[in-house]
Amino acid sequence: MKNRKKKRPSRKTQAIEIHRSDLAAPVGGPVDPGPSGLGRRDFLKLSLAAGVGLAAPMMFVRKASAQGGERVLKVVQWKHFVPDYDKYFDVFAKEFGEKHKAKVEVDYVATADLPTAIAADISRGGGHDVFHLNGTGAWLYDKVLVDVSDIANRLSKEFGGWLRDSQSIGVVNGRWLAIPSWFISFPLLINKAHFAEVGETYTDKTTWQQLLAMGRKLKKAGHPLGIPISQTPDSNDNLLPLMWAFKAYTFDKNGNISFRKKEVVESLKFGKALFDETMTDEVLSWDDTSNNRFIISGKGALVNNPISAYRTAAKDNPDVYRNLEIVKTPLGIGGLRVNGARTMSYGIYNFSKVQDLAKEFLYTMNREGLQGMEASTGYNHPFLNALYKKPMPVIGREPKLQLLEDYHKDVRFIGFPGPMTKTATAMYAKFIIPTMFAEVAKGKNPRAAMEDAEKKLRAV
């Protein structure tokens, strides 16, 4: 190892691209629609609907890196919004490679470019071995994924099983085709000073109906609530859990489209009241950064967002930060609490030449999930039960974040109560639910809006 004069081959990728946007959404951006079960044109349409800016293919070209018979594992990885996590992942990849006498090359790709990178790999049958599924599960890519049931079962046995509904993300027709690695939580963030100003206190037992009553007072006092009802990923992640708290489902347990019409209409009526009585028209045009600015400015009383807004407020507006508090999601029908999440999973291409090495990489990465949580400053929540021993990294040390240690108990994922199918992912990508709520907010009859949404979903 001494006197190494040869320059190490770079792990950096030269990206040759005709069109590319490096603007990533603050909490992960849109899901990455893939080609499984879709024609090329349909895939492009779905990608565009998700806002990924897919105008032309982006290709990855590498300089020769491996020497002799050295094995090379190539990973296409989402560029995390916490830079320290990418630094951690670099070290992890390097150490894994050294242990297994291999070279691990990681390409960090912005949210908008991840679907394009995956599509490019699939179209030419090569490029990477492991790929990151941002906000979607195995169903969308089931035709190009390796069976990783052995790794999933090994992790389950060693770490007390998977969180409830994890199978809905990674299992297709009885086989694990992707490994759920971590998710991003979406708790409520409130300005408790604004609530106190109108004589209200938010508690763990606050219901959605009680929040509506509180919101009326807050809006009159100049501090409205802020839930996006627009074509942005955060809107999906806010409105779907609200619907599920009303037992307003759009799929059955098997993933078939099945609108619970009465409950869906009731959730839309509630959404209309919430919009009219507690919010302003600005939420109809918000993007994923708007709610952050809204609460950090001091104007807003409440948002439903990852802890990014909380952390940014600490730097940008300390006076507001002192009054911010992360609280549990309101209770719905019969005391039902439902938490939303953005899921992050990994799969292995079936054209990979190093599938065994790739499996070991995913196994090692997931068993070290707490290190990843530490490096991400508490954003990454693991999927394995045994990793939830308190105190957890970061969130267990910060008093205002400690309730997130139990967030996983009420978390649900896209497609609930069924699996994260292609149709469920398309519903998310095409913003069918936010559009339905927005139409009602603007005056459309709730039943008519629901029927239109169902037609759109069945047409996917």
Image (spheres, rainbow, N blue to C red):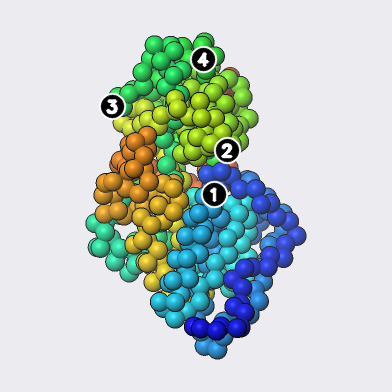
Q: Crowding near pointer 2: few (<14 within 10 Å), some, many (20+)? A: many
Q: Crowding near pointer 1: few (<14 within 10 Å), some, many (20+)? A: some
For the residues bearing labels 2 and 1, Cβ distance under 8 angstroms: no
| Residue of label 4 | 219
User: Which residue sits at x=63%, y=65%?
Assistant: 120
User: Which residue sits at x=29%, y=66%?
Assistant: 154
Q: Amino acid at mark 4?
A: Lys
Q: Amino acid at mark 1?
A: Phe
Marks 1 and 3, how far apart at CA? 37 Å
Q: Amino acid at mark 3?
A: Gly
The tag on residue 350 is none
- Residue 75 placed where, x, y %? 52, 67
User: Which residue sits at x=32%, y=43%?
Assistant: 396
- Residue 430 placed where, x, y %? 58, 42
| Residue of label 1 | 81
Sequence order check: which comes first, mark 4 or mark 1?
1
Sequence order check: which comes first, mark 2 or mark 1?
1
Marks 4 and 2, how far apart at CA? 22 Å
Q: Residue furthest front?
A: 3
| Residue of label 2 | 288
Q: Nearer the viewer, mark 1 or mark 3?
A: 1
73 is higher (above) or lower (below) than 427: below
User: Which residue sits at x=30%, y=40%?
Assistant: 406
Q: Residue furthest bottom?
A: 68
Sequence order check: which comes first, mark 1 or mark 3?
1
Residue 328 vs residue 99, the one in the foreground: 99
| Residue of label 3 | 334
For the residues bearing labels 1 and 3, Cβ distance under 8 angstroms: no
143 is higher (above) or lower (below) than 232: below
Sequence order check: which comes first, mark 3 or mark 4?
4
Q: Secondary structure at mark 1?
A: loop
Marks 4 and 1, how far apart at CA? 32 Å
